[in-house]
Amino acid sequence: MKDYVVAIGTIGIDEYIKVDEWPVLSDKAIAQRISTEVGGMISNYSCNLATTGVKTYILQQFANDEYLPIFKKELDKYGVDYSYCDVNQNIETTKCIVANTKGERTILVVDGKNEPFKLSDSSIELLRNSKFVFSTIPYLKNLIDNKKIIESFVEKGAKLIIDIEPSSFIESDDIEFYLSNSSILIFNEFGIQKYSEYLGMNVYDYLKKRKKIAIITKGSKGADLIDKNEIISILGEKVKVVDTTGAGDMFSATFTYGLMKNMTKKDALRESNKAAAEHIKYMGPKRKI
């Protein structure tokens, strides 16, 4: 096992706009264009983590379109290794419209055409020798033979970190496979609400019984970490909010960095909370930890 991290997922384009008042249904609103950024959870996480000096790989399929050189330039800028990625002629780049309204954001995802991703033998070996693998359940499901691959790298000793989004529960028939093979689960408030609905019980009580770390990020209210019967809570930091886009990705990247540096769980949680609070003081989806 080597001291590097592999992130599995897609990279996309974020179109930032400012909307003074979010419209009600059937109404319209005037928006101001702010900027166009390379974004997406996996891209943000990978770039943030790579700024710490941790060797970070990204595994994904690039669309062969006008955004490809932009993506490569961005990943090169932050030092993310994309040498194991493929270029697929049949897929499209996903775009997000990020509407900023009084410091809070609404994201509209224009999903690009996608295809299942077949990993090469060398990519699978990369996963097997990693220290951490970061992804989401939908991204993992998009890998051909994903369950076999996950079992292979988990058995070898790599630890799986899953960011649990509400979309994880759309097709939830086999969700327990992914949860049981993970070492760390990261929820935001919407993800934990969906998980609670899925379980039909108090999710904190349930997570205490699982032999893994679960983190619940709560925005301005801070974060909780559950590990067996222990709950560690960190209060949020009061800052002037400019843009919350990518705050969760910054939190996850900082927590991974803390684990790589053998911080205590409480210290890693505190540093992650602090980094996320600092992140939302500025516009944009990623920055140096």
Image (tube, rainbow, N blue to C red):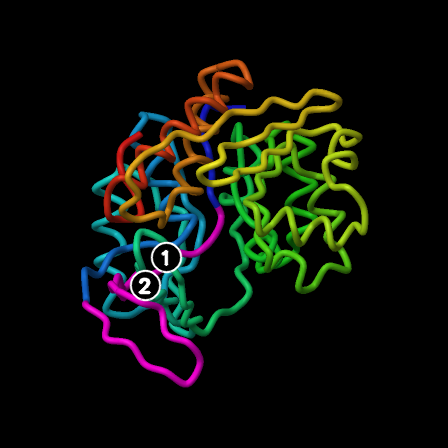
- In this picture, is 190 found above or below 134? below
Q: Of residues 50 and 203, which is closer to you in this image? A: 203
> Label 2 to label 1, Cα distance in Å?
5 Å
Give the mark count: 2
Can you give x and y, in whole percent of width and height, for residue 119 in the image? Answer: 53, 53
Marks 2,1: beta carbons within 8 A = yes
- Answer left or right for 59 relative to 288: right
Location of residue 34 by image quarter: bottom left
Horizontal side, residue 231 vs residue 58: left or right: right
Residue 229 position in % (x across, y down): 75, 22
Q: Residues within 10 Å of mark 1 (few under 14, many from 20)?
A: many
| Tag 2 residue | 99
Q: Amino acid at mark 1?
A: Arg
Amino acid on which disc 2 is placed:
Ala
Of residues 37 and 103, which is closer to you in this image?
A: 103
Closer to the camera, 142 or 95?
A: 95
Q: Residues within 10 Å of mark 2 (few under 14, many from 20)?
A: many
| Image spot of residue 118 (x, y percent) | 54, 58
User: Where residue 166 sits in the image (x, y, percent)?
Assistant: 60, 56
Specify the segment rendered in magenta.
Answer: 8-32
Q: Give the secondary structure at mark 1.
A: strand
Q: What label does residue 105 carry, if any?
A: 1
